Image (tube, coloured by chain):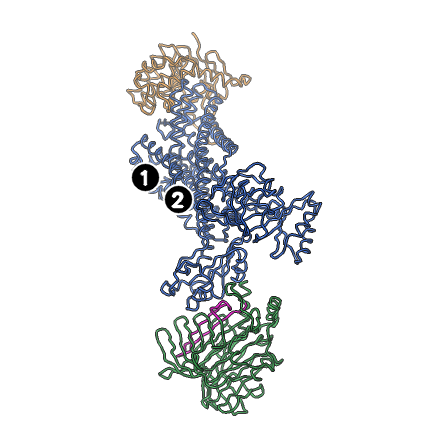
Amino acid sequence: MDSLLSARGLNKQFVSGGEPVSVLTDLSLELARGESLALTGRSGSGKSTLLNILCGLETPDAGRVEVLGESFDSQRPEAGGKTGTRWGNLRRQQIGVVFQEANLMPALSLLDNVRLRARLAGHEQRNCQDWLERLGIGELAARYPDQISGGQRQRAALAMVFAMKPALILADEPTGSLDRHTAGAVIGQLFELQARHGCGLILATHDPELAARCSQHLDLGHRPEV
Amino acid sequence: MRRRFWLFLVAALAGCSEPQQEAGFAGLAGVSESDSGVAFLQPGPGDRLTFPEDFGPHPQHRIEWWYLTANLKTEEGEPLGLQWTQFRQAITPRLADAEPPEPGTWPLEAAWMAHAAVSFDSQHYFGERLARGDVGHAGARAEPLAVWLDDWQLEASGNDAWQLQVAADGWSYDLTLRINGKPVAHGDNGFSAKAADGKGSMYFSLVNLQIDGTVTLGDQALAVTGRGWFDREWSSQFLKAGQQGWDWFALHLESGDKLMAFQLREEEGDFRAGTWIPVHGEPMSLGADQLRMSPLTTSEGYPRRWQLAVPDVGLNLDVAAPPGDYRNTGLYPYWESPVSVSGSHGGVGYMELTGYGD
Amino acid sequence: MILPAALFSHYRRHPLQLLALAAMIVLATMLWTGVHHLTSQARVSLDQSESAVAERQQVKRTDGDRVSVADFVELRRRGLCVMPWMEVADPDAGRLVGVDPLAAGCFGDPGQDQEPWQRELDGRPFMDIAEAAELAGQHGSALSLLVSDAHSAADLPSGYQLAPFRVGPETGELGDSFLLNLDALGVLVLLITALLVRSVYLLGLAQRRDSFALLHRFGVSRGRINGLLVVEILLLGLVCIVPGIWLGRWLAIGLGSGFGRALEGLFDQPLYAGQGGGWLKPMVTMQAVVLVACLTDVLRPLGRRLSGGSRGFAGLLLLMLITGLAWSVWASALVWLFMAVAMVFVAAGALAPMLISRLADGQAGRDKDPLARWRHRELSVLARRLALPLVALQFALAMVLAVQALVTTFESTFDRWLAQRLAAGYYIEVPDAVDPGPVLDWLSEQQALASSGVWHQVVRGEATLMGTAGKQDTVVDVFALGPVGPLVTGWQLFESVAEPWQRLRQGQGLMVNEQLARRHGINPGATLPVQLGGGRLDLPVLAIYPDYGRPAGEILLDVAVLPPGFVPDFQSLSISPGTFSIEAIKGQLEQMWQVDEVVVRDNRAIEALASAIFDQTFLLTRAMTALTLILAAIALLMMGWVFFSTRAWYFGLLVVWGLSRRQASAQLTRLAVALTSMIAVLALPLGIWLTWVLVHRINPLAFGWSLPMAVYPPFWAELGVLSLLVGFSIALLMHRQLQVQASAPASASALAGGER
């Protein structure tokens, strides 16, 4: 099986109230193309931190991440100088990130948001309208984020992610602020597109049903008591 | 400039107030002499009076005045005292026959000051006017007599009669003065010594003026009649260093006799002189040894009651001001009040006191 | 007590915000109080000098003749309290007034502790009228008869009438106009401070809106919350305004003494050590400004209703701008001119952010690159969100620009004026009744003087310009000098024929000053018929020389041209001795003129003193405007910082989407710098226009003469660099924000930075 991402021995500590708090302790995971991984755990259990580490927005205190053939080792600072650029290139072209909210530039229309994301990924901007159509919001292309509903905004966020033709999607509770019905529809589209394009998906969620739809499940458990 | 001017005005009234250093006068005189080449004349023994010229101004003398005091009665018989004085103070002496300067140059060779007062019913009304000389609104002339400052004026009106008009703030008077008798020359034929060293002034009086007219106080017009005393005096120096002020009396006695007496108060003994003017006979100059003057009662700084005695003529008088405040509160405050006379003789008169504080 | 505590707990958690708002109110108060204090100080002093000379009424003759000493005597003899007032125009000493202190005695008013003429006039005591009358013979004079207020027209004899008495009406107007200028500056500063206070307040409000919403959800009515906010801002205003006023006074008094002296030098107005400006007025004004600035939201819906939508509003503003501009060209009175200026500023201020926003939107519409489109759309949002501090910066920039141009113009005019007046090292007055001839001969014979120094003789007097073609004869000042040399040949002439100085030296013509040329439409080459000392001369005009605001007409001649019958009013010598000793000259003159002492005026010392005084004034003016600018820049920085902190998440998205932090920062820098440079560019025309208004409109209307209008592009560049610096500073702050991981906003609302 084609390994998309592998993480080994990740450790991350925060300082809270003067005391170090371990968020991630010796965590390892593996994801292949086409696979999906559900991250569960209560608030503060480290889901977002892990996602950030997996796309290079945060650096682990210890451990090693290999993604799409690029290897990032916290113990090998010699690669450090280029680390940011390598991660940046990955996020630009290969890793799509979807947050719970505010995935769109408020000053741009939906279509312009998708175009911007495609342009950064180095893709043609012609298909952008198609992506909006495929997510069922084609007629909203000229609208601005504040003119549409939360569900429509998350669909637009998915359109942006797929427009960049990602190899890996990291979604941090992408439907957390939506009602159950809308959430179901949006997440359905996510799984459908992920399956069709064969990219990897790591989904942080509270919802056990959603977690059950993923091929893997990693429970980060409770936040350790201080 | 202004300051110098006021300073000089202060000096002008030095004759009725604080002692003035001789140097102050001399300094001023020095300046003016170098300007015009004319010096102030200093009266001395042997100087004589000339009429009518001496009723007019003496531009070569530093200071002079025309001085009327009157003891009048209203129709109701209430006593009313009245004063009118016009002072001239020269800054630059000028020959008597010299052309006066052009009014258009606003000359400042002399300054004029007029005082007017009415004392009635324990009230004292006082007014003051100031003017520079040679401009035209203030001046004096001997023949026919005219002494004026703004709309205050004393003017001859027919034979041996003068008209005096004064309008002050809220009160005024308009009087006719009839002259009885010849001018009385004081001292040595008009030279009245004012200090032991022999310096003094030229001084004569008309002592028996018959006055009638109207005094208006507010909206109350009072017809008045009575007697007046008119002084003419000029000099170039009055108080010398060490002299503090003077006390002056002019009394009309019921007997018809008149008395003028004054003293200049000095640290080392006062200088005292006077003139006894009997109804009949010649006026008699009184020296310090013939004249006794002593204050009896002093209140609020002013000796208001005096004892005056001339033993040679059997005179022993108690002279007292009526109740009230009779200070003339002008640039230079001094006391000017009518007095009543009792003792060996009855009578009325006027008392002037200067150099008592304020 | 719980509710206020809950409301204000925001500031306990964010003390810096409270500090920023407080600091802004303090600084704004200080700025305005400083300007206001100077203005009121100047006003008090003007009032004082006015009351020192304005004794309400005078007597005039009904037949129109001038009053004379005879009239004075006539009126005094009729018992009227009248005093003479003789004004002498001495070209060297300025205005001299002679009064008769004796005649003034009757003016004594028990209600007043001092009669006006016992005060000083122009810093000097009144002189006795006799002295004035003496001077009047040389310089000409005007006699007025002042009459006590106690008299009414009915008291006057026939042939006389009462008239109001004012000394030097043009002086009063001059002073008023100058104060009007200061007032205008004060209003502008007030406007800027209001904008700044408001922007900082809105910022705090925006950040507290969540807690307000929470309180509202807990059942606290909006009216209650608003009421508490009013109380809060009132208290904050009270606490901050007092130290602000104190600081402003300190600023004004500390720097104001030189200002006063310069005012005196500039406008012949004495500046008394006035305690101008109480506490109440600045207190009330600033409290009102703070309240209006902070609580103007209540009025906003009303304004929106009136304007009828944004497009209509913009149209209205444009109309206002055009009307204001047109009005500023044609306004015939200062008041209208200031109204026009106000209109232009309001319209320009409202339009500027709108214009930037629309331009950016328009550019975004044309962009093919989505990233450029994003940037331009962001710029548009920024312009609207930061409208208030931006406009404040624009106004401050415009004001600084205009004041700089004005001050520089004044400075150079003043320098040239000084140079013209004080060209020689020393100035010696020739005493009256002295024939300068032998001295001139002696001076010409001195080899050392001829080889290393320069000198000339100046003769002043009057001449009559003969009227031609129905025009009336005009009396002009004569300025005759000789030998014509380097002391004058360096003058900048406005217009001239060929070799003007050489021809002047040869007596082949005369020169006229700017005012005379303007008034009579005289051009070089024209021939002027001049009545000089009884004879008539027809001389060609060789040149027009600048007079720097001197209102009297003047002709410049070689002294040799003067006919023997010419009676000089005044003679002097100007000497730069070079290696020759001025002491030797002085000694020689004393000997030749047989006077104890010849007064030698050291022109360099005078020049140094004058320059020092003016420098301080100009420094103060610049300091005031610079302070305004700094305040505006700080406000923009602060606002920019806060705005970006609400929007940091979205800028963070760029990094999430793969841009490096450096690339993202570069985008933001371009954004910020574009914003500040655009406002600087928009401030430029406003500033130039304001300069034009000050120099070409206000000055002629107020002072009757106009300064040359100059623009200073290097200074524009300086301001441009400054605005870039502000932009870079904002970018730097934003960059720091980007380093910190922003948390995702819970909603896309405008309050959370999600506006478009």
Judge by depth and name the residue closer to the eye, C583 or C22: C583
Dominant secondary structure of the residues highlighted in magenta in the image: strand
Labels 1 and 2 positioned on one and the same chain: yes
Return the residue found at the far right: C447
Chain displayed in blue:
C
Residue on which the image places disc 1: C299
Please name the color used to draw chain B: green
**Residue C531 vs residue C671, the one in the foreground:** C531
The image shows residue A38 at horizontal and vertical percentages of 38, 17
- Residue A41: x %, y % from top left: 38, 22
Residue placed under numbered mark 2 in the picture: C333
What kind of element bears circle 1? loop
- Which of disc 2 and disc 1 is earlier in sequence? 1
- Disc 1 or disc 2, which is closer to the eye? 2
Q: Is residue C160 above or below residue A200?
A: below
| Residue in the picture at 54% in, 78% down | B246
Mark 2 Cα within 10 Å, few/some/many (few <14, many 20+)? few
Please indicate, yes or no, whether residue B214 appears anywhere in the rendered image. Answer: yes
Residue C585 screen position, x and y as percent: 68, 51
Q: Is residue A103 visible?
A: no
- Residue B224 in the magenta stretch? The answer is no
Give the magenta part as a residue range.
B109-138
Residue C338 image offset from top left, x and y in percent: 40, 42
The disc labelled 1 sits on which kind of residue?
Leu
Compute the Cα span from label 1 to label 2: 32 Å
Q: Colour of chain A?
A: orange
* Left or right: C385, with C626 as reference point: left
User: SS at mark 2?
Assistant: loop
Left or right: A42 with respect to A70? Answer: left
Q: As rendered, which of C272 and A63 lies closer to the eye?
A: C272
Q: Specify the quadrant of the image occupied by residue B99.
A: bottom right
